[in-house]
Structures are given as structure tokens and as C-alpha cells.
Amino acid sequence: MKLSINGQVSEVDVEDDTPLLWVLREQLGLTGTKYGCGIAMCGACTVHIDGVAQRSCVLPISAVSETQKITTIEGLGVQQFHPVQDAWAEIDVAQCGFCQPGMIMAVSSLLAQDPNPTDEQIQSEITNICRCGTYPRVLEGVKLAAQRMASNQKAGGSNEQV
Ligand code: FES
Ligand code: FES
């Protein structure tokens, strides 16, 4: 089947029930998307499908159509860093980093839908698990990214991804 990933069409030959995560990692070499639990609990495998965060470890490839746009961490901020990536770098959110691609994909999707979430909304929407306990910096990073996105918009810039 054909898939639209990070702005390019890729062709893969896999069983219908293969989870998207394994297509990305094993067929296409996009290993930025991580395997944590395999049961939709941890969020390490989060990607965007048409801009919405989805846990790819439980999404069979047959549930994704050719017309849907899949974005992985490799496709976020290609020309320049996404404001979430900038904020993450600025305040050093990551510790070991394993959960962070999924965390960044979840946060960028949240801010695309709700540019000014409250602490409570961030805590209820970003349910990704971080074994290093970076949660306070994640919260700080979401707020910094939200401020950056608001000022980009005021300046007439774009927060678009691929
Ligand atoms: S690996 Fe998909 S949610 Fe944990
Ligand atoms: S930074 Fe290590 S698991 Fe989150």
C-alpha cells in the first residue's frame, strides 16, 4: 500500500494488521518513533495523522488511508524547528530522551488544536509517560511553546508542519 509520510509517498508491502509503528520503524527506517509498551499506554509511539496525535503501536496499517497525512518526529520542523522543539531545546526538557519524540508530537498536536491550554488541560491531554520524570519541564515547555506560537502568529509567521 501507499502511505503519505512526512510529505512523501512511500510504498510498503506488509500484512494488513501490522501496526503503523512497525511499518515506520522497520520498513521505512523512521526510528524516531519509539516502542515503549505496545498497548497504547505510554505514548512513546505518538505520530500525527492529519495533524492529530495517535498512538501508532495499536493502529493497524489497514486503518490508515493513502490520503491521510502521517507526520513523524522526523517530519516535524524540517525547514526550521517547530516552536515545541525550540522550547524543548531552550529549557532542556529531555533527560534520557526516549519518551521525548512522542511527547513532542503529542504537545504539538495539542497546541495546534488549543493554542492556550490551562495547566489542567495540559495534564489531562498529555498522558505520555516519562520514566525520567520530566513532567515539570514538559509543563514549562508547553507554556513556552504556546507563547512562541502566539508571537509567531502575531508577527504573521506560521507554525505549520509539513
Ligand atoms: S508504545 Fe505505543 S503507547 Fe506505548
Ligand atoms: S526523558 Fe527519559 S523517559 Fe522521558
Image (spheres, rainbow, N blue to C red):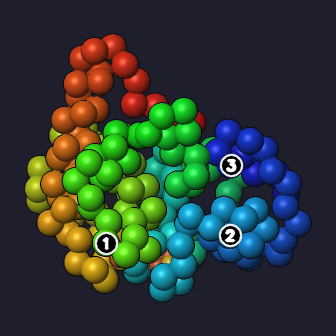
Residue 93: image x %, image y %? Answer: 27, 61
What's the residue at 22%, 24% (across, down)? 151
Q: Residues within 10 Å of mark 2 (few under 14, many from 20)?
A: some
Residue 24: image x %, image y %? Answer: 68, 65
What's the residue at 54%, 33% (across, down)? 79
| Image-based side of 58 in relation to 36, left or right | right
Q: Which residue is mark 3?
A: 5
Look at the image and tell me whether residue 5 can be seen.
yes
Tell whether circle 2 marks a residue whose Cβ is less than 8 angstroms from ligand 1.
Answer: no
Look at the image and tell me whether residue 121 can be seen.
no
Callouts 3 and 2 close, C-beta under 8 Å: no
Q: Which residue is mark 2?
A: 25
What's the residue at 22%, 53% (across, down)? 91
- Circle 3 SS class: strand
Q: Earlier in the sequence, mark 3 or mark 2?
A: 3
| Image-based side of 122 in relation to 76, left or right | left
The vertical placement of 37 against 97, above or below, is below
Between 16 and 154, the one nearer to me in the picture? 154
* Mark in the foreground, 3 or 2: 2
What's the residue at 52%, 54% (across, down)? 73
Q: Which residue is mark 1?
A: 95
Between 115 and 151, the one nearer to me in the picture? 151
- Circle 2 SS class: helix
| Image-based side of 46 in relation to 100, left or right | right
Question: Label 2 amino acid?
Answer: Arg
Question: Label 3 amino acid?
Answer: Ile
Q: Quadrant of residue 155?
A: top left
Callouts 3 and 1 close, C-beta under 8 Å: no
Q: Residues within 10 Å of mark 1 (few under 14, many from 20)?
A: few
Residue 32: image x %, image y %? Answer: 56, 64
Q: Which mark is residue 1?
A: none
Q: CA distance from mark 3 to mark 1?
A: 28 Å
